[in-house]
Amino acid sequence: MDALSGTDWSLLQSFLAVADSGSLSRAARQLGKTQPTIGRHIQMLERDLGVSLFRRQARGMELTDQGEALLEHARDMRRAAEALNLTAAGKVADVRGTVRITASVFVSHHVMPAILAESRALYPEIDIDLVASDRTENLLFREADIAVRMYRPRQLDMVALRLGEIELGLWGATSYLDRVGHPTSLAAAMACDFIGYDRDEEIIRGFRDAGYPVTRDFFGVRCDNQTVYWELVRAGCGLGFGSVPAGAADPALERIPLEVEIPKLEVWLTAHEALRHTPRVDAVWQILADGIGEVLRSS
């Protein structure tokens, strides 16, 4: 632990990222750095500590016994550093500064721009970082200040506000339906082409819950990016699932009636309790709560 305490924190961040991800490339993506930079950080840390931290394996990087012995100490240092940052940020009384928001790619594309335009008009002194991502950014580690989640957060020390629900439907482009017919049930729609996810099995599970045991091969086109997925539906590549507010607002799309109910998505706003009531976070929180809430109520 004494050896770690005098070490450059950026080297420890790289060590933890490689240990958690098992790969230099994945650690680089996680930290927003290049793979050679992460590799140099590991070499420098090993030189400073005088130990070998990782073994290169066919499937990535594996901790050595020395690396395992240092891992929990490094994690303790990370937790202490993040607690210090959160506490310090929570004491800032000035509304000026940056608020970092994370939301799914689809919500970031279809919902956030108008709301953030309102935020900029009301609070031009608050800069906004919008992280459009379908992975879960960690609020504890300040990867974001406010998160828009499609599930109820269960982490401790979090403040969460339920904003409402998003109704989902099955949609097809009018151009596609004019060519293949306009089905009036899921059973009839099964003769159409469907767009699915690539690696995410959520749609497959939904079909199976409805009594249709489809596999990945059922979908002629597959994509995990929700915004690209939606554009594939709009272009007429097949039928696809999406939010009712977005579909109803698009004249190029038609909703397919279903005899089964699609579970609705809950929408939650969440932030760390140490930051929730800082002036700039509170100001943006209120704008998001009002703006997203209005979108959900109007759907």
Image (tube, rainbow, N blue to C red):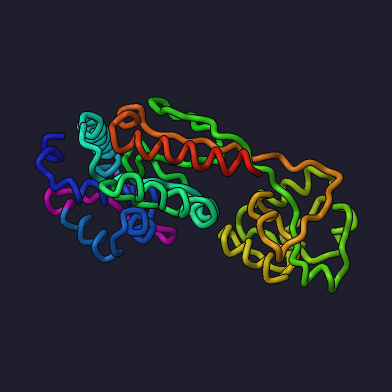
Residue at far left of view: 6
Could you tell me residue 150's position as x and y percent? Answer: 56, 41
In this rendering, position of residue 165 left or right of residue 182: left
Could you tell me residue 42's position as x and y percent? Answer: 22, 55
Q: Is residue 187 above or below residue 2?
A: below
Q: Nearer the viewer, residue 52 or 164?
A: 164
Q: Is residue 269 above or below residue 217?
A: above
Residue lying at 38% horizontally and 25% vertically, measured from the top left: 157
Q: Give the position of the N terminus as an image quadrant.
A: top left
Indicate whether residue 52 is drawn in magenta.
yes
Residue lying at 49% horizontally and 53% vertically, measured from the top left: 108
Q: Is residue 217 visible?
A: no
Could you tell me residue 84's position as x and y percent? Answer: 21, 32
Residue lying at 77% horizontally and 67% vertically, measured from the top left: 174
Q: Nearer the viewer, residue 248 or 233?
A: 248
Residue lying at 47% horizontally and 53% vertically, measured from the top left: 114
Residue at far front of view: 121
In this rendering, position of residue 246 left or right of residue 114: right
Could you tell me residue 18's position as x and y percent? Answer: 33, 51
User: In this figure, what is the number of numbered marks?
Assistant: 0
Q: Is residue 239 above or below residue 51?
A: below
Q: Quadrant of residue 68?
A: top left
The residue segment tinted magenta is 45-64
Q: Is residue 150 visible?
A: yes
Indicate whether residue 96 is drawn in magenta.
no
In this rendering, position of residue 144 left or right of residue 76: right
Q: Give the position of the C terminus as an image quadrant.
A: top right
